[in-house]
Image (cartoon, helix red, strand yellow):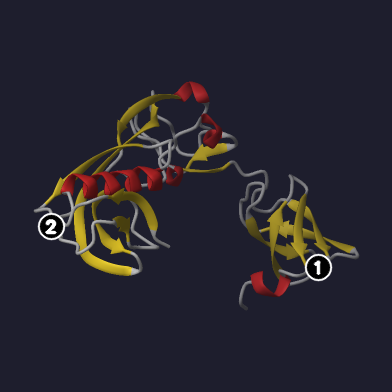
Amino acid sequence: MAILVWTGVETTLVDNAKIKSVVTEFVHAKLGKMNRAIIEFHGRMPNIATRSANYSIRVAADVLPEMKGYVSIPVEIVSGKRVEGRAVISVYCRTFDTVAVTIRQIQRHEQIKQEDITFKEIETTTLESDVVTSVLDLAGKRSTRIITANSILRQGMMERIPVLKQDDRVTIAVRSNYSTVTANGIVEEDGGIGDFITVQRVGSHQRVHAQVVDARTVEIRIDEFNRRQPSR
């Protein structure tokens, strides 16, 4: 996919300011409205001449890496159906976002609540992409380790609060499009709603991999049964 974003008229030398404009617009489009960025151009800009006064500038890539830090962006100068020139533009993308920061130290396996955090706008260029940007990300979550005060909160620091714990007894519901078969089971690992956990059938050595529905039920969809079973 090539995105046409500017059309030049009556010139044979491509203005580097126009190339910068194309690249800047492309980067902001990739980042989306929720992310703010400063685009810094690095290295020498190219001198590209075209034999036609009617040309367009486009970013010539379908897939590019994440728009953070140093990024190389290929551009093409096109006249009609012919590419008149190519160049790789080096930029440094400084990204900014409003992220969650802890107000106090949070203990391992402690539920994280809205009053435990504040939101600050900071530069996120060198941060992992899983930073928490919404209070909704905290719903039903607890910490996986001790989180010190003034820490930038990341998704990797949290997990769903388990509604089932090891040795809990549950109903295993095996469902298809036409019927449901149930059996009793014993939970072998903690799990929150939506997690897949290992459950042993009561009175059997059989273990199955099932999805937690609630504090009393785990579910196996028959179309996923074979794919999700643990190896013996």
Q: In the figure, is residue 215 to the left or right of 156? A: right
Are dots 1 and 2 in contact, CB under 8 Å?
A: no
Task: Measuring from the top left, give residue 110's x and y in whole percent.
Answer: 51, 34
Please state which amino acid type lies under the numbered disc 2: Pro
Residue neighbourhood size for the residue with mark 2, other residues' Cα within 10 Å, grouped as few (<14), some (14–19), many (≥20): some
Instruction: Tell me where residue 90 sits by quadrant.
Output: bottom left
Task: Measuring from the top left, give residue 132's x and y in whole percent.
Answer: 44, 37
Q: Secondary structure at mark 2?
A: loop
Name the mark on residue 203: 1
Q: In the figure, is residue 216 to the left or right of 154? A: right
Q: In the figure, is residue 139 to the left or right of 181? A: left
Report if residue 126 is visible in the image: no
Q: Residue at x 23, y 50 (%)?
A: 19
Quadrant of the snapshot with the N terminus: bottom left
Task: Measuring from the top left, give residue 202's x and y in whole percent.
Answer: 79, 64
Quadrant of the snapshot with the C terminus: bottom right
Task: Measuring from the top left, give residue 228's x and y in whole percent.
Answer: 65, 69
Report if residue 156 is visible in the image: yes
Q: Residue at x 70, y 75 (%)?
A: 226
Instruction: Tell me where residue 46 sits by quadrant.
Output: bottom left
Please state which amino acid type lies under the numbered disc 1: Gly
Q: CA distance from mark 1 to mark 2?
A: 74 Å
Q: Residue at x 32, y 57 (%)?
A: 59
Q: Nearer the viewer, mark 1 or mark 2?
A: 2
Residue reaching furthest bottom?
232
User: What residue is disc 2 on?
Assistant: 46
Residue reaching furthest left?
44
Residue 33, placed above or below residue 199? above
Residue 203, placed above or below residue 14? below
Q: Across the whole image, how many numbered discs are drawn on residues?
A: 2
Judge by depth and name the residue closer to the eye, 183 or 205: 183
